[in-house]
């Protein structure tokens, strides 16, 4: 696995390393980007369909498709979900909205997993009623809600999310397996939960799950987590049926500093290490090994296409103000994440001291700093790379800016897969409440 830093590496406010890396990860031709900009405008999210396929294939070459549950939260556009699911993989949905998206994209209920993230009673009830391949519970209230709404005539396979107490090396906001995290049951609580599920008509415990965090580049914490899950599974005899699957969650990172996927942590290597461990420990009786990748499937496949509004000096340093900002793509602001930013043709040049800023009324609206983008002028097009995961899904309407459109490219062809929001979209649900004077 790559020793390079991956995922959501934190960067300071100064110059960032790797600023000149400019190879075009998402493989979208400049002519296509120009056409998109001319026809539907900027900012826009542009995804490369073939890169999405490649992102799934990195997993399907190593893991049977039914054991891969793409995490919908990373990119939940209906056309993207349909494209990814066409490879035979399942989907992990953490909310009723994500579940509904998965189904609306055409994926049957038995290929959807309700993920082990905090859920309210309405979500649990709605999903159990609609049908789901597996529902993972991570707090007592969720188990009790499931007991109230499960249908004894149609049992739902159930999973228990375990809090492993492992700090896996993610950005602090994205560590989810440490002992003080809010997710899951402590290992010693699991037998009672398993028993409760086994005794509840309409629920059938099958799976133990963890999710260690996001943006990881090392297999070691996964191996530690697998060991723990096997230990816990070994203690469930007498509390209900044997464990049929161990779900090690998502979290595999992307080396955002590098221009392409070559050095990214390898799903195949992770799967092999875990399978070997499983065989050593569980032999023939080994449960299935399942994964919930998000970022590693689709981050490389998308860019934010933006037009430079103007250039200016900021405290003696050059800056470019663009029409995409942190409300469109907040990863730098939220996590200090580095995303390569470059012109659509050729490479950026000059000293790595250019700040790339968004248009909203905050000085903190930053897409990247310390970039080699001298010579870039007003009206030029730029791409923020590796924005296919946790991009559009985290966009907001701050400053009443309509969220950008999304576009899917296949070679020289492209088509919109979501419209730019309109003004009506901005005040949907408000106008009927306007009071007459
Ligand atoms: N499974 C569960 C239960 C999760 O909570 C997550 C992500 C995944 C799978 C997928 O993880 P991935 O393979 O994508 O790392 N907004 C942040 C990422 C938050 C991830 C939350 N959970 C970012 O922009 O980096």
Image (tube, helix red, strand yellow):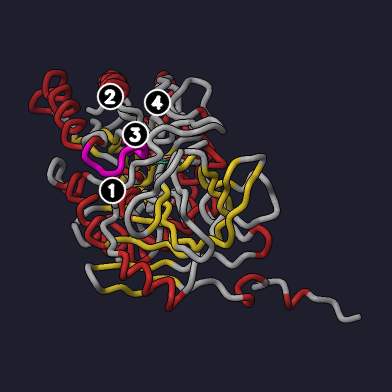
Q: Position of residue 174 (x, y in %)?
A: 47, 33
Which residue is farthest right? 437
Asked whether mark 3 lies closer than 8 Å to ligand 1, one says yes
The residue labelled by disc 3 is 209
**Residue 92 in view, yes or no:** no
Residue with the mark numbered 1: 23
Element type at mark 4: helix
> For the point 31% across and 27% down, which residue is it?
4
Q: Main secondary structure of the magenta part?
A: loop
Report the Cα–Cα distance between label 3 and label 1. Answer: 37 Å
Mark nearer the N terminus (2 vs 4)? 2
Question: Is the residue 148 above or below the residue 338 in the image?
Answer: below
In percent of width and height, residue 311 lies at: 58, 55
Give how far apart the Cα atoms at labels 2 and 4 are.
Answer: 34 Å
Q: Is mark 4 within 8 Å of ligand 1?
A: no
Q: Nearer the viewer, mark 3 or mark 1?
A: 1
Of label 3 and label 4, which has the lower sequence position?
4
Up the image or down, 282 lies above or below 130; here it is above
**Mark 3 Cα shell of 10 Å, populated few (<14), some (14-19), many (≥20):** many
The x, y position of residue 416, in whole percent, is 38, 73
Question: Which of pointers 4 and 1 indicates the residue nearer the eye?
Answer: 1
Q: How many marks?
A: 4
Image quadrant of residue 103? bottom left
Q: Which mark is residue 3?
A: 2
């Amino acid at each position: 696995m790559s020793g390079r830093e991956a995922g959501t590496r934190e960067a300071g406010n100064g110059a960032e390393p790797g600023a000149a890396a400019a190879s075009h990860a998402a493989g979208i031709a400049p002519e296509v980007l120009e056409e998109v900009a001319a026809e539907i405008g900027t900012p826009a999210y542009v995804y490369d369909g073939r890169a999405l396929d490649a992102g799934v294939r990195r997993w399907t070459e190593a893991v049977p498709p039914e054991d891969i549950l793409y995490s919908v939260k990373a990119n939940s556009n209906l056309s993207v979900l349909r494209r990814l699911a066409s490879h035979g993989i399942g989907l992990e949905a953490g909310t009723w909205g994500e579940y509904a998206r998965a189904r609306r994209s055409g994926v049957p209920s038995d290929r959807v997993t309700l993920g082990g993230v905090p859920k309210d009673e309405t979500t649990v009830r709605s999903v159990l009623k609609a049908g789901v391949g597996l529902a993972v519970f991570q707090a007592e209230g969720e188990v009790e809600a499931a007991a109230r709404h499960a249908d004894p005539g149609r049992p739902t396979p159930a999973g228990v999310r375990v809090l492993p107490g492992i700090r896996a090396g993610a950005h602090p906001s994205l560590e989810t397996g440490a002992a003080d995290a809010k997710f899951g049951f402590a290992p010693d609580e699991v037998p009672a939960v398993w028993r409760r599920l086994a005794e509840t008509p309409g629920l059938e415990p099958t799976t133990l799950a963890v999710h260690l965090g996001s943006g990881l580049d090392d297999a070691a914490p996964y191996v530690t987590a697998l060991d723990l899950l096997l230990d816990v599974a070994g203690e469930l005899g007498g509390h209900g049926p044997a464990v049929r699957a161990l779900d090690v969650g998502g979290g595999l990172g992307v080396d955002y500093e590098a221009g392409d996927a070559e050095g990214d942590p390898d799903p195949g290597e992770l799967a092999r290490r875990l399978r070997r461990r499983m065989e050593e420990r569980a032999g023939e009786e080994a449960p299935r090994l399942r994964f919930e990748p998000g970022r590693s499937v689709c981050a490389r496949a998308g860019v934010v296409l933006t037009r430079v509004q103007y250039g200016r000096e900021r405290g003696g340093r050059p800056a470019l103000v663009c029409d995409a900002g942190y409300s469109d793509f907040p990863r730098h602001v939220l996590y200090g994440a580095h995303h390569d930013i470059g012109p659509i043709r050729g490479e950026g040049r000059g000293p790595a001291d250019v700040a790339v800023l968004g248009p909203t009324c905050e000085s903190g609206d930053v897409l990247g700093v310390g970039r080699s983008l001298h010579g870039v002028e007003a009206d030029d097009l730029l791409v923020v790379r590796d924005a296919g995961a946790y991009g559009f899904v985290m966009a907001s309407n701050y400053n009443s800016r309509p969220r950008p459109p999304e576009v899917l490219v296949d070679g020289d062809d492209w088509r919109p897969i979501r419209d730019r929001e309109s003004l009506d979209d901005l005040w949907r649900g408000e106008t009927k409440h306007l009071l007459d004077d």
